[in-house]
Amino acid sequence: MARDATTPPSEDLIHVEGGAGLGAAPAASVGAEEMVGSVVSSPARAAWRRFSVNWAAMIGLVTLTVIVVVAVFAPFMHTSSPYTLNYGTLDAGPSWHHWFGTDGVGRDQYSRLLFGLRVPLFVGFLGTLITVVIGAVLGVVAGYAGGYLDFVLSRLTDLIFAFPSFILALITVSLFGPVLDPYFGGGGRVILLSVVFALVSWPFLMRFVRSLTLGLKEEQFVEAARVCGTTDWGIIRGHLLPNMWGLILVQVSFIVIGVVSTEAALSIFGLGVQPPNPDLGQMLFDGISRLDYNPWEVVFPSVALTMLILSLTFVGDGLRDAIDTRMNN
């Protein structure tokens, strides 16, 4: 039956969660700004709901948060200096004074572990940040521009792929690490490792972002923006990248895992941060020679490194399931 202009809207309209859609609540109770905000934020809220019901991902997130907090506030949580030598307590087991025991020169393992967590986290963060900047920018430019520029960038990516990443990192740190250490207060190897990992990791992300761009640039909303006179940079910044950030974040979580694992492996080989600076891999390298009579020197760094990598893995899996819903279909 037809409704005249004076008839009030019905209360039994279909209600869509978040106030979005044609059947939303009456305009008198929901403002336009609230409706727009709900539409914009609903994908993020939906992804968080899917992530939060994943118990493994939540355990990984909590564990990773604790590890980061402990590493950041290590100067306020350690029980003694991680550099102090105490020849009266060599290779001591866990006790009330030394919770995780001591190493071969009497240094407190608990304090060294707290400070040692900083190195893989710093290398993982800085290396991944550089990787994302290089890989995302080159990937979206190659995919959107196409033609000769896409060909050149793709061949450059193939060239980087030809180098064995671990061997390249091994050679670079061996040659230039001792040269840079004096200029950065012993932290030259950390910065060098971050840069090397970024240089060998960005091709993976570049190819991924390029493939996303090739699909998105043919969508109608991009064509509409182009018809309206939006510049290429405006389309990339305002339309392409915002629709990729979730999937890029998933890839970033796994890049961090690779960087942290490689840094630990190099440290175990003695090519990471040099003594007396604490590092999980270096602690494992030092403790292997005394494994027969002081296994605690290896146990606690191994557990910490395992928890760090597992938490990153669980978070990455949770992000993939929450953001890329196609994986669940």
Image (cartoon, helix red, strand yellow):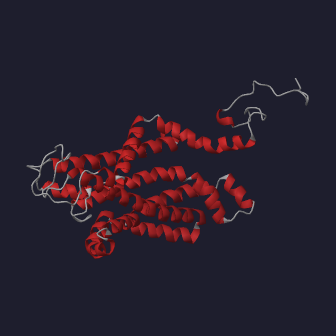
- Residue 245: give x, y in percent of width and height: 54, 53
Vertical comparison of 161 with 45: above or below: below
- Residue 21: give x, y in percent of width and height: 71, 37
Residue at 31%, 74% (x, y): give it: 180
- Asked if residue 17 lies left or right of residue 255, the reply is right
- Residue 27: give x, y in percent of width and height: 78, 35
Q: Quadrant of the N terminus?
A: top right
Q: Nearer the viewer, residue 32 or 15?
A: 32
Residue at 58%, 57% (x, y): give it: 241
Vertical comparison of 160 with 91: above or below: below
- Residue 103: give x, y in percent of width and height: 15, 54
Query: Is residue 133 in sight in this rendering?
Result: yes
Task: Give the image quarter of residue 125.
Answer: bottom left
Residue at 91%, 28% (x, y): give it: 4
Task: Give the image quarter of residue 11.
Answer: top right
How many numbered marks, from 0 up?
0
Residue at 65%, 60% (x, y): give it: 235
Query: Is residue 328 in sight in this rendering?
Result: no
Task: Give the image quarter of residue 192.
Answer: bottom left
Q: Nearer the viewer, residue 35 or 215?
A: 35
Q: Nearer the viewer, residue 213 or 129?
A: 129
